[in-house]
Image: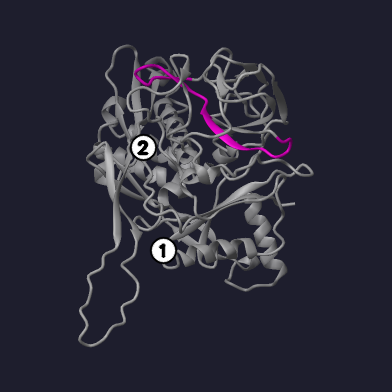
Amino acid sequence: MGLIKQFNIYAPKNQALISKALTSAAGVGEALIPEELEKTITDTIIRMSPELAMVERRQSASKYHKFDRITARPARGGSMGEGATTSTTQSAVEQAQVQLKIVRRKGAVTNFVKDVSRKFIDAAAFEMENHLQAHVLDLIYYLHNGNADSQSIYNGTFGRPAAGNGYEFDGLGKFVSTNRTNEALGGVVPVSLKSLDDMIDVSNRKGGARHRRVFNMAPEMLSKFSQLLTNVRLNQGLSAGGMTVVDIPGGWRLNAYRDIPIIESTSMSPVEIMNATVTYAAEDTGVGSLTDDTYYIRIAPVTYEGEQEAEAEQNVVLGLGGATQRIRISLDRHHQDVAGNSSALSYRVYAGTVSGSLSLVAVISAFSYSENGTPADDCLVGTQYGYISSLTPGADVPAHMQNDIPLQATGGVRPGNIMLWDLDPVQGLGKMPYANTEGDKFDGLVTTFPLAVIDDYVQFMVKSYPALCDSFEATSVLHRGLRTA
């Protein structure tokens, strides 16, 4: 619930803006069309999310957004004699691309509810506000934890139709590889500002010094570093604790360290432990590659609040004698939040053959998909089994993620992550192309439009067609496993 609370500062203003736009015409269906609403939606999105306020949103006219990625500078050594022949050198550039993904949701309000509640609340505006908040939470999840290669169930087996791509775009947690640190199991407590300084230093060495950058950390971690600043009596600005304050689009005022804004993101630290019951079973159907051994496993849900604490370690003994064995995974239900609602969007599977020494081997979606891509919230649940067929991960866990270990509490305090995000669109990870033509007048990453009237209710859709570009990842930094106490 922490991420939703983050929006509450501006919630009254957001709802008032949308309500005004919706009631500015004779009927709700008509009011969804005017440009004023699209501008209102765009402004509201920026108010809701500093992450979306900071990225560079760019229109794309294709399903695939292509961009140039510099892989090498021109050849070294320019010193030579006066009459020498100057050689021609070039930088190395490769053309890369990202596929825009479809993120949308549909809402409906009956005319009866709209009419009987009109003296107390604009039900259509209220419902659109709720859908808009959920849509923003989806986009923030994909920004941090999106994995286009995550495994999902299709026709009873892992896979996806057509080109084999996932239905979400890759996020920062998958892109950052060069500067990625994992602390020991249980995490460590920072005792100085060195961890922040080290992140800035490695980013600067890769060329990020003059770029727009932000830190992403949990509110509790920001408080921890603020205390450390106070303890060493640094005077970096006029605000208490020695941190400067900067303004960013959307009316956000953020603390800053060494002039780098700090986004208090509740996607960076777990708030709960995996609470679904996981059942593991050994089987040999000739499709796995595991051999006889004892395998240790932990599963962590990933929610709007980020990666959560993994379940307690379990072990499975494979003793069927073959080299084609695998481990079947089944949940009694999806992981739930404190309110009892299913909240996992994916699961991270950690496994190994040594107790207490597990690493990431798979990322599995919480959703299964039909042949046309329609999602169902049942992957891994019941007989929609998942599998560990190998300890060698696939594309969902590239090499730089294979050192990731579970986030495990120490003394009741859960460790989290800190991200230094370089927002440069060319030499960083700050460009988000999108193809929402209806919203292009207002740089509308998120657009809304009415659906046809087919019964006694008003329907609308909220949609985005975005992706995040991995133009250059080495100036961004991910530090996993820091805790506050």
Closer to the camera, 400 or 215?
Answer: 400
| Number of numbered discs overlaid on the protein picture | 2
Instruction: Return the mark for residue 211.
Output: 1
Task: Return the residue at label 2.
Answer: 20
Name the kind of residue labelled 1 in the image: His
Closer to the camera, 447 or 174?
Answer: 174
> Residue 234, position in %: x, y?
65, 72
* Residue at horizontal 41 percent and vertical 33 percent from the top: 168
> Residue 221, position in %: x, y?
64, 53
Name the kind of residue labelled 2 in the image: Lys
Closer to the camera, 443 or 200?
Answer: 200
* Residue at horizontal 76 percent and vertical 44 percent from the top: 410
Label 2, label 1: how far apart the Cα atoms are: 38 Å
* Residue at horizontal 32 percent and vertical 37 percent from the top: 100
Q: Residues within 10 Å of mark 1 (few under 14, many from 20)?
A: some
Q: Residue furthest bottom?
A: 82
The residues colored magenta run 354-376
Q: Looking at the image, can residue 245 be seen? A: no
For marks 2 and 1 on the same chain, the one whose residue lies earlier in the sequence:
2
Secondary structure of residue under mark 2: helix
Q: Quadrant of residue 339?
A: top right
Q: Nearer the viewer, mark 2 or mark 1?
A: 1
* Residue at horizontal 68 percent and vertical 57 percent from the top: 224
